[in-house]
Image (cartoon, rainbow, N blue to C red):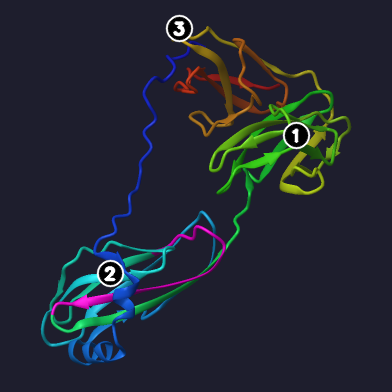
């Protein structure tokens, strides 16, 4: 199967920037606002904020939760908001372009984001200043920040399907670190028929990054084999994350699929990935647990009477992966 050149275009990662407009963190300005001015403005301008206050509940550190607030001018004349003064480092106001003028009966919706940096209870507020009456409304905000998971497994469960006794089936997964680096010292499988590969212990995953691993299912007997794979902390006694593994050992047969392809002519190619699907055009799942440095691969996890579709990709030294190769169709007797 000839392969297209390895992709050399840089991966474009969209970056969403929350534009915070008109929000000034100034505790003294809020504290200087008297209850009398708030009461006066509410009586004369009749601005309605829905909801009046926000409770964000529990949010893991490093994650965020967004709620929307709608301002409605319930008065008989237009009102102009010229400033928003906020308190609370974990709360950000987005989507409000000040000054904002609302005609009678007009509404506007903006968002407030709770993005805690440390665990614990958080409080904040935003006071809105109108052109004529001063402080028109003050929104109070509360939230609780909890420690997020140190590491997660993606996918959280791997199903190998049917694998014949005496052969092997391979799949891969990712370990993703949370808001801080995590060190893993070992991986413990509850069944020796499942073997972890592609990892050298101990290793540390930087915050927000991931580490790929492979798992091989080599059934010795027929029957289902539900298993737990545990990745252990530095003490070696506590599991940071567990992966659910499932596979079924079936009666042995002699069928396997030998795949071969021409080497890519692109520069700096360091290996290949092999993908398999049961429909032409995909979806396809990678079946090699680690990067294949040869130009051949044997798939031993095939099932009798099944039609498979194979494609391959080339990977260069910058971890850029080519498009899929031409399709290969194989029918198992």
Query: Viewer-proximal residue, 298 or 71?
Result: 71
Residue 15, quarter of picture:
top left
Indicate left or right for 101 with 191 as reference: left
Give the alpha-carbon distance from disc 2 to disc 3, as whole Å. 55 Å
**Pointers 2 and 1 in contact (C-beta within 8 Å):** no
Task: Give the overall secondary structure of the magenta segment.
Answer: strand
As drawn, 161 above or below 309: below
Instruction: Please provide the residue range marked out in magenta.
Output: 113-131
Query: Viewer-proximal residue, 107 or 238?
Result: 238
Of all residues, the one furthest to the right in this rendering is 221
Q: Which mark is residue 217?
A: none
As drawn, 14 above or below 40: above
- Sequence-wise, the earlier of marks 2 and 1 is 2
As drawn, 149 above or below 14: below
Query: What residue would you read off at disc 2?
Result: 109
In the rendered image, is residue 66 in sight? yes
**Pointers 3 and 1 in contact (C-beta within 8 Å):** no
Q: Which mark is residue 162?
A: 1
Task: Tell me the element at label 1.
Answer: strand
Give the alpha-carbon distance from disc 3 to disc 1, as whole Å. 36 Å
Residue 40, quarter of picture:
bottom left
Give the alpha-carbon distance from disc 2 to disc 1, as whole Å. 53 Å
Residue ID at (41%, 68%): 88
Disc 3 crowd rating (10 Å Cα; few below 14, some 14-19, many 20+) is few
Residue 97 position in % (x across, y down): 21, 63
**Pointers 2 and 3 in contact (C-beta within 8 Å):** no
């Amino acid at each position: 199967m000839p392969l297209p050149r390895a992709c050399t275009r840089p991966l474009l990662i969209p970056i969403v920037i929350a534009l915070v407009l008109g929000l000034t963190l100034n505790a003294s300005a809020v504290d200087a606002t008297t209850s009398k001015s708030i009461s006066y403005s509410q009586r004369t301008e009749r601005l309605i904020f829905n909801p009046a206050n926000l409770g964000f509940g529990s949010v893991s550190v490093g994650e965020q939760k967004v709620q929307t607030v709608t301002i409605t001018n319930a008065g008989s004349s237009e009102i102009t908001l010229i400033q928003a003064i906020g308190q609370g480092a974990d709360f950000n106001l987005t989507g409000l372009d000040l000054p904002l003028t609302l005609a009678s009966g007009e509404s506007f919706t903006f968002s407030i984001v709770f993005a805690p940096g440390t665990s614990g209870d958080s409080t904040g507020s935003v006071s809105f200043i109108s052109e004529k009456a001063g402080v028109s409304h003050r929104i109070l905000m509360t939230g609780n920040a909890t420690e997020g998971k140190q590491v997660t497994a993606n996918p959280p469960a791997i199903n190998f399907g049917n694998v014949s006794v005496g052969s092997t089936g391979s799949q891969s997964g990712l370990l993703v670190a949370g808001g801080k680096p995590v060190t893993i010292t070992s991986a413990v499988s509850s069944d020796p028929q499942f073997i972890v590969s592609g990892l050298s212990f101990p290793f540390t995953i930087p915050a927000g990054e991931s580490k790929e691993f492979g798992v091989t299912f080599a059934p010795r007997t027929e029957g289902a084999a539900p298993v737990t794979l545990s990745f252990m902390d530095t003490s070696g006694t506590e599991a940071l994350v567990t992966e659910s593994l499932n596979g079924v050992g079936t009666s042995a047969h002699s069928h396997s699929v030998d795949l071969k392809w021409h080497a890519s002519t692109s520069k700096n190619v360091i290996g290949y990935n092999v993908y398999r699907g049961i429909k032409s055009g995909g979806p396809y799942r990678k079946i090699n647990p680690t990067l294949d440095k040869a130009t051949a691969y044997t798939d031993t996890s095939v099932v009798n009477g099944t039609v498979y579709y194979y494609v391959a990709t080339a990977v260069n030294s910058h971890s850029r992966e080519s498009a899929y190769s031409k399709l290969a169709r194989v029918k198992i007797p």
